[in-house]
Image: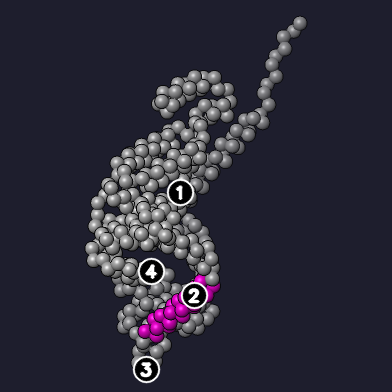
Amino acid sequence: MMTFVIGPISRWFGQRSAITQKQLDEVYAGPPFDISLRYPLVLNTVFVTMMYCGGIPILLPIAAASCLITYSCDKVTLMRLYSIRTAYDELALSMLPFALLIHLGFSTWMYGNNQFLKSNLLDVKWIVTSLGLNHGDAVSNVNDVYESFRDIVATYDPLGRNGLASKIFRTNVFPMFALFVMAACSIFLSQFIRALLWPILDKTLGLVVRVVSLLGTSAVACVGNVCLRKRYASSDDISTIPQYPDFTGQFEKTVPLDSKVDREKGFERLPSTGMLIRKWLVDTPTRDTGDRMLTWEAFTAPVRTYSIEANPKYKNAVVEMRKAAKRMHGELVEKSMMSATPRNPAAVSPM
C-alpha cells in the first residue's frame, strides 16, 4: 500500500510544494530500512520451526512460505520504497548451527515418547553388560532387560524412569541422539579451536606449512629452470640462448617467419638463419651505409625527424589544423581592426 498507493500520491503533492532541491529529494526518499525489525522475525521463525518440527512436521512448509513471503516483500520494498539498502551480515548465519542443535535435542526427546511412537529396542542386554550395570536377575527377554535398565538408570537420571537415558536406546531415537552428540562436539570444537587453538596452531603448524610450501615452490622453479636449460642446450653447454645478444655484439632477434619486416628502418632477415638484423641507412662518422648495427646501436638508433607532418598518417590532419589556425587568426585580426575604427560623430543640429 505504501509503495504503490500512498507513496505516489505523496510524491505527486510534494513535488509541487517543494521549493529547494533538498525538499524535493526528501519527497522522493523513502523511510530508512530498519534491519532490527527483520532479525527477530526471521530468527524467531527459524528457531521455533527447527525446535518443534521434529514432532510437528507441518511447521516446515509454513516456515518456508513465511520466509519466501518475507524475502519477496523485502526485495520489493528495498528496491522501490526504502532509501537505505542495508544487507544482512553473517550474525544470523553464525547462529544457525545452534538451531540445528536445538532441533536434534528436541527431536530426541519427542521421538522417545513410547505412547505415540512405538519402536523396537536396541540390544539393551549388551549395553548393560558393557556399562558394567549387570542386574542380578537372569532375564532373557528384551523388554524385561529394558525395564531393569530403566530401574538402574533411574537412580542417576534426575527425571527418573521416564528421563532421557531411558529414551535414547530406542531404534528411532538413538540415531538422532548420536547426531546431537556429534553436532554438539563439532560446534564446541569449532568455537574452541577458532578462539584458542587457532592462534597457537597458526604460529607453529602454520609456520611449518608455509616453510614447506616455500621450499616446494623454490624446488619446482629450480627444476623448471634446469629443464629449460637442457631444452635449449646446443651440446654439452647448458647455457640458454638469449633473446638478444650482448650489447656490444651484433643485433639479432628471433622472430616468427610470417612476421612483417620494417625495411624502411633498416631491418632485414638473414636468409640462412631467419634472424632479424638491422643495418645503417645513412653514413655516420663511425659507420657506413649497409653496416650491421650493434645491439646498443639498434636500441638507441635516432629517428629521422621529429616533424609530425612527415608521418603520412598525420600529414593531412596537421595541414588542416594549420589552415584552420590561419583562418581563425585572420578573422580575429579583421574583427580587431573593425572595432578599432572610430565612428563618425553625429551631426549636431543648430539651436
Disc 1 or disc 3, which is closer to the eye?
A: 1
Give me the residue at 52% from left, 26% from top.
27
Give me the C-alpha separation between circle 2 and circle 3.
Answer: 44 Å
Amino acid type for the residue under numbered disc 2 = Leu
Amino acid type for the residue under numbered disc 1 = Ala
Badge number at residue 236: 3
Which mark sits nearer the N-terminus, 4 or 2?
A: 2
Judged from the image, the secondary structure of the residue bearing numbered disc 3 is loop
| x and y percentages locating residue 90 in the rendered image | 47, 51
Give me the residue at 24% from left, 51% from top.
118
Judged from the image, the secondary structure of the residue bearing numbered disc 2 is helix
| x and y percentages locating residue 249 in the rendered image | 47, 84
Disc 4 or disc 2, which is closer to the eye?
A: 2
Disc 3 or disc 4, which is closer to the eye?
A: 3
Badge number at residue 350: none
Position of 346 compared to 212: left or right?
Answer: right
Disc 2 or disc 3, which is closer to the eye?
A: 2
Q: Residues within 10 Å of mark 3 (few under 14, many from 20)?
A: few
Residues in magenta? Answer: 201-227
Q: Residues within 10 Å of mark 4 (few under 14, many from 20)?
A: few
Extreme bottom residue here?
A: 236
> Label 2, on which residue?
205
Which mark sits nearer the N-terminus, 3 or 4?
A: 3
Badge number at residue 92: 1
| x and y percentages locating residue 6 in the rendered image | 44, 23
Badge number at residue 262: 4
Position of 286 compared to 59: left or right?
Answer: right
Give me the C-alpha separation between circle 3 and circle 4.
Answer: 37 Å
Give me the C-alpha separation between circle 1 and circle 4.
Answer: 66 Å
Dominant secondary structure (helix, strand or loop) of the stretch shown in magenta: helix
Give me the C-alpha separation between circle 4 and circle 2.
Answer: 59 Å
| x and y percentages locating residue 203 in the rendered image | 54, 72
